[in-house]
Image (spheres, helix red, strand yellow):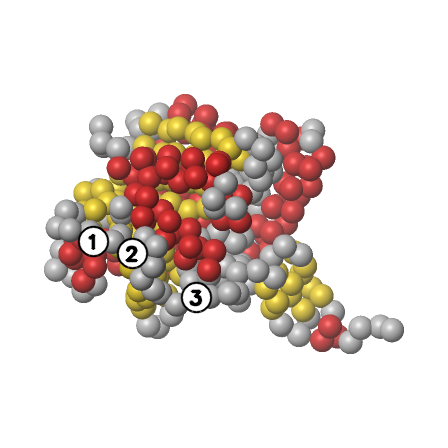
Amino acid sequence: MDSTPAEEILHDFPSHVRVYKDGRVVRFKGTDTVPPSTNPDTGVQSKDVIIDPETGLSARLYIPNNPLHNKLPILVYFHGGGFCTETAFTLTYHNYLNSLVAEASVVVVSVDYRRAPEHPLPIAYDDSWAAVKWVASHSSAGGGEVWLKEYADFDRVFFAGDSAGGNIAHNMGIRVGSCELDGVKFVGMVLIHPFFGGKSPIGSEGSNSEMIIGKEVADKLWLFVYPSSSGSDDPLFNPVVDPKFSSLVCDKVLVCVAEKDFFKDRGWYYKEELGKSGWGGVVETMEAAGEGHVFHLFNPTCDNAMAMLKRVACFLNEDNA
């Protein structure tokens, strides 16, 4: 039996999203939102804030148990999900950031940017930049969020994200280099399995069948979430071709990769090219043996996930030499 026009599929990414001809969007993950809370095990507190009522841009804030009177590093976090699934309020990210805040004793602002395909890129970038500027506004009398005023150290600001969120974190770092943020010191970035690409295959992308398929899907997904993009060598997707690549103003970058992730070679390539670009900071890489893409979200108590959690926590608290 032939399907009706309403049932015809226009775009299909089985691990993420499906779009029908009648405009329906079905997401296959990242729909299980949970409210903010005080975690009974760690004491980490969270609450939700509206950043821009006109667009609906919002965020979930986290502070550790008993933050005392010491000012804490600020981590602006961008969730993953291929720019089209997940939110800052899903159980996966709520649990992960609870654990990270407890381990690292930092203030986290988890950004809930608008998602494709209803809001194609560059909207997520613009939302994320608006959130970064909102955070920075609290370094003076401009911002009104008590947790940021009371607990945040604006001389220790970090960006982080996984997958698409890692892509966003990098691009926010590039924007800081072009548009300085008054009153804050942007110290570093943590890019976890970042969603980067490029027209020409690198490493095992040109020889390993799984990596070849992974690259094809990633390239297709990129054009789905950003239809007006120039393609796989768009600097927003392939950062090493960006003339502004070396303009990062942070001191250090940690790139986390996983052995079985089809973005692994892109993470290593980013690390190597950033080190050769003339940028004056320190870039490090941590690879998880035997693991796949964003494994730490699905298996947060495994040895590799716990090791990565501790490494990220140390990175956020190291002296900013």
Mark 1 or mark 3: name the one nearer the start of the chain: 3
Q: At numbered mark 1, what does the secondary structure look like: helix, strand or loop?
A: loop
Q: Name the residue beneath numbered marker 3.
A: 34
Q: Earlier in the sequence, mark 2 or mark 3?
A: 3
Cα distance between the residues tagged 1 and 2: 8 Å
Q: For the point 78% across and 76% down, which residue is it? A: 4
Of 62 and 214, nearer the camera is 62
Amino acid type at image mark 1: Asn
Q: Secondary structure at mark 3?
A: loop
Instruction: Check disc 3: other Cα within 10 Å, few if <14, some if 14-19, many if 20+.
Output: some
Q: Say what amino acid the circle numbered 2 marks.
A: Gly
Which residue is under mark 1? Answer: 66
Is 290 left or right of 321, judged from the image as shown?
right
Label 2 crowding class (10 Å Cα cut-off): few <14, some 14-19, many 20+? some
Q: Is residue 90 above or below residue 96?
A: below
- Does 37 appear above or below 157? below
Image location (x, y in percent) of residue 229? 54, 51
From the image, tell me which residue sits under label 2.
43
Query: Which quadrant of the figure contains the C terminus?
Result: top left
Rendering coords of residue 198 (x, y %): 56, 38
Q: Quadrant of the N terminus?
A: bottom right
Relative to 93, residue 311 above or below: above
Quick check: marks 1 and 2 in contact, CB under 8 Å? yes
- Which residue is pictured at 58% across the width and 33% down the height? 290
Front-most of residues 190 and 247:
190
Q: Earlier in the sequence, mark 1 or mark 2?
A: 2
Task: Name the quadrant containing residue 253.
Answer: top left
Residue that appears at 33% across and 27% down? 282
In this rendering, position of residue 90 left or right of residue 49 = right
